[in-house]
Amino acid sequence: MAPNPSGAPEARVETSRPVGDRVEHTTCYMCACRCGIRVHLKDGRVRYIQGNPDHPVNKGVLCGKGSAGIMQHYSPARLSRPLRRVGPRGSGEFEEISWDEALETATGWLRPLRESDPRKLAFFTGRDQSQALTGWWASQFGTPNYAAHGGFCSVNMAAAGLYSIGGSFWEFGEPDWHHTRYFLMFGVAEDHDSNPIKMGIDQLKKRGARFVSVNPAKTGYSAVADEWIGIRPGTDGRFVMSLIHELLKAGKVDVDYLVRYTNAHHLVWQGGDAEDGLIARDAEGRPLAWDAGKNAPVPADAVGITPLLKGRFEIKGRPVVPAFQLMAERYLDPEHAPEVAGPVCGLRPQVIRRIAAELAEAAFEHPVTLPVAWTDAAGRRHQGMVGRPVAMHAMRGISSHSNGFHTCRAIHLLQMLLGSVDTPGGFRYKPPFPKPIPPPVKPTGAKGPGQPLGGPPLGFVTDPADLLVDDDGNPQRLDKAYSWEHPLASHGLMHMVIHNAWAGDPYPIDTLFLFMANMGWNSSMNSAGVIDMLTDTDPETGAYRIPRIIYSDAYYSEMVAYADLILPDTTYLERHDCISLLDRPICDAEAAADAIRHPVVAPDRDVRNFQGVLLDLGARLGLPGMTNPDGSPTYPGGYADYLVNHQRSPGIGPLAGWRGADGQSHGKGDPNPDQLEAYKANGGFWRLEIPEDGRYFKFANQSYLDWAAELGLLGKAAPITLEIYSEILQKFRNAARGLGSVEVPEAHRARVETYFDPLPIWYPPFEEAALEASQPGRFPLHALTQRPMHMYHSWGSQNAWLRQITNHNRLYINRATAAARGIADDDWVWVESHHGRIKCQVRLIDGVNPETVWTWNAIGKRAGAWNLKPDAPEATKGFLLNHLISELLPPRDGAPRYANSDPVTGQAAWFDLKVEVSKADPAEAPLTEPRFPPLAVPPSVTGPRPEVSRFGAEFQPQEGEAP
Amino acid sequence: MTTLPPPTPRRLGLVIDLDTCVGCQGCVTNCKEWNTGGHMGPLTDLDPYGPKVDGVWFNRVHSFEINPGAEGDPETARTVHFPRSCLHCAQPDCVTVCPTGASYKRAEDGIVLIDQERCIGCKLCSWACPYGAREYDPDAGTMKKCTLCVDRIYNETLPEAERQPACVLTCPSRARHFGDLGDPDSAVSRLVAERGGQALLAELGYGPVNVYLPPRRKGPPPDGPRELTPAGPADDPLAWLDRPVPR
């Protein structure tokens, strides 16, 4: 045989073609992970996007989403011009208008609101990475009705962490991937902090560290874990408290760590008076501890004392006990024994016992010692850093329950008892954390017509007097954050905004201004109901109940069709941005870091970066900070101008790197006109390492505290005492008991008293508890969503590559659970909750908790949206669980209905959903329900959709091109 | 029909770790974006925004479940993320069946490629391949497949560290490794030896170059602790704390 029939030699392969003709470094925005990317361009077109090998977040790797960025950038669903609605809301009928007209329209709507009652603007942003700007803008406008999406995402994690250890899970901390021996992960959505976790799992496996995943579903990370614990949803707190029970009984607790770094030894007043449950303090306000040597109270932060953690004492005849004693009494109760907790969690008691034993062995039999001398904040010199190599991480599966705040606090308590928080091998803070507990920023309310707020709209309350309520205790904010309904709602309650605006509860508004939040579809509970609210009219006037809606998005999402004025945003490759220390930075446990985006390609449409538009609107409205005394805009160069020149406080701006006129200052310094160029020259990011002796024990490490204060991350270099016992929660409880100066409205007293427990508690999620009381057994299954690693919420379906991987979803159900209902693989089923029902198709699996069904989030699409063909599988076979979830808890005896939220933080309780599943009549059409009429696609959506995409053909060698 | 070169001393290929692949699809889309503008591109997509969407992919990851235990038992079920691409076999029938000489195996490194100029789209090769690694492009009328990023691994315009297949460089859990499996001392060969790497369907005799590393053992460590011992009597469980704790 010849090499080939024609006898010709092997084809010549060009192996050294240049990738493109230009390379730019910027930041990915295919999800919230914020990896560094190198964008290769050829003839102005995006040829290839790769992970930036030098970037601190992703070190060169890039996930399925990031690697599909080209198709997002060239999506035919991109909006291309400002639009004004001409048909009814939801019709998709718009006319194109100029930017000047759009901005004048918006200004004309907003100016009278600012002059009369700024609260009538509700400004909510979605998966916004510029909250330092958007929050400041709301503040300058004067409306407290501002938040981003944290209230429906992660506020339970943020608040529980910040009110316990001054830092939190999610992207604000990380396991010590290099030293941990035991990694325990709870309920993590696989598109969250995704590349760092994947890279970390590789580190663990290389070192032979043990990885245990607690999650009702065995997908993604759980599939590669050394052990999967298929817990029943909403019971993680019970599981963790049972682990604590076991550790306490066995004395496997790091008491040395506790007395040095936590308030375990602080004395707590007992006795039922106004100070009941509060920390006993000396005249200077220093917490007291009981010294074994002196047999007397001493300042708890003193060095050389021997505090007792156990016992009952008296100070001037009044009883006190150490916080540890209260904690230990609670969790030693037989209620927390594995044989009691196990059945609640759907786990065998011996699994709980074994995990407790494994944790104790890793922590206490294998301490990690790093040969790094350091000095603690009390001046003690340590020759090495000794750590407990047990690390934990938790996110959505904990966060999305109405008991999530306390469950997350329980996980932090477990970490504190093991002595592992920010020690070698443990959970580590990323700067700017740890912060004082909680961070010293209070939320502020409206000051009145024409007035900016006195501070930021969001912050951290520490006392009932900090709540944003009127004299009768009614909410001041539209979303009822910081009210008695949700006192610690540090991120607001975005999921209640449309409902409350529609209901005029607590007051009607005029304009709803949304950015990048698909509230007309997958970002709302009760999506069909929300659509009705967005289109509901006053029967007398015919006017919409929510009079005006302004929306900014880059793409034709479902929400666009329900807005009156559309401000089209750019893609992530066409824009400036900052990944700021003031917002959600990209720090790691060993360095502070921030980054930029910058336009690597010019828009080919008449679109503008939303943040620049916001500054423009601010200048048109004459908002302070955005307008010069002569009325001219303060930032005529738009968002890039702001990034460089804005100062939040003297010397501190959005970007920390290369400050000062000479670009030599970091952290603090005057604006540097060449700052963005310096970022670009450094690969798009800035990173400053913590001194080597400051990288652990940051809450009490003098080297770290000095460094953080110098950089402006902390107000002062003072140690932070971790709180196993929360005095702040007790203050609210006391108020509810009538012990204090602030009165709690009668309707909320019992709730506040119950859920403001100073120690973590567990209770069944609210929806489950209510339904079990009213209709026992009617909705026996938990239903929840998971995130495919290759999709980010609703964004992926417009992506020609990603939608080939997933373009419809199934309901995953345990094989035995399905068999008990006569359901076979591929069957169509009805799924019913107390709120509604949907129809979808099942896939039977084994790797799921038998009492749980789940599906992929946000794959189902409204026909016509995202410029997909109306018969795309996303619309015919894709579905949302959202239709089954009510934004309100089930009714209670005529009393007002609370939001379907955590009672402490207001976090949306997406995963409390309970359902029953039954086989659909096979004669019914194989289409998901509910169905909605297709949305019309406005003419200015970029389209048209190609029938064949030959993307990349343009990069092939041209005739005669030199190799 | 097309001849093969003599057995190649260099056998470039991939080692894929099924213990760390979390199924994120990073290698899948990074392969797509590199190769659609690369040597065998474009990787055409049909009906990209409609119901019949289908495209050319050189690398796919299949996620599925197996259960060696009882049906319905969550604990014994195993979720598998299985990356699949051309294995650049030593004995590739996809080459020998090619009637035009379009399919060929390179003598210098063993990579199997298709000359797009000579391919007539007869699909004989896709019938011959037992791994389903060949991808027909109905728009171009030709067969396409994984090139092992032949336009990256020798590309002198790239930094040396990046002369690797796109799927390997991008993998977030570092589950993919590239190297010369013909060299017993190469890093990939040593990894295969350490971890007991396995050829896919070796019994078919095609001599696949790519190797899969099997998942590690799951479940409780056999020699680990089972439960803790109480440190105090039942009526004083905190007796262990009857000691001073100096601060």
Image: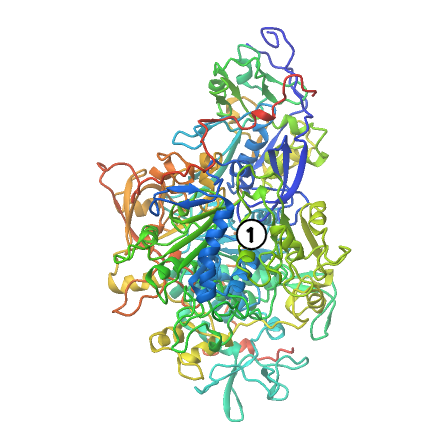
Residue B223 visible to an observer of this rendering:
no
- Residue B103 position, x and y percent, is 57, 16
Q: Quadrant of the N terminus of chain A?
A: top right
Would you say A700 lies left or right of B138 here?
A: right
Q: Is residue A153 above or below residue A963?
A: below
Q: Residue at x 60, y 75 (%)?
A: A259
Q: Residue at x 74, y 65 (%)?
A: A373
- Residue B136 position, x and y percent, is 48, 21
Q: Which residue is mark 1?
A: A611
Residue A76 visible to an observer of this rendering:
yes
Would you say A720 lies left or right of A869 here?
A: right
User: Which residue occupies the foreground of this view, A609 or A778?
Assistant: A609
User: Which residue occupies the foreground of this view, A546 or A259?
Assistant: A546
Quarter of the view holding residue A63: top right
Q: Is residue A38 above or below residue A302?
A: above
- Residue A122 position, x and y percent, is 44, 60
Which amino acid, by three-letter code, is at mark 1? Gln
Residue farthest toward the front in the current orientation of the protein: A630
The chain letter under disc 1 is: A
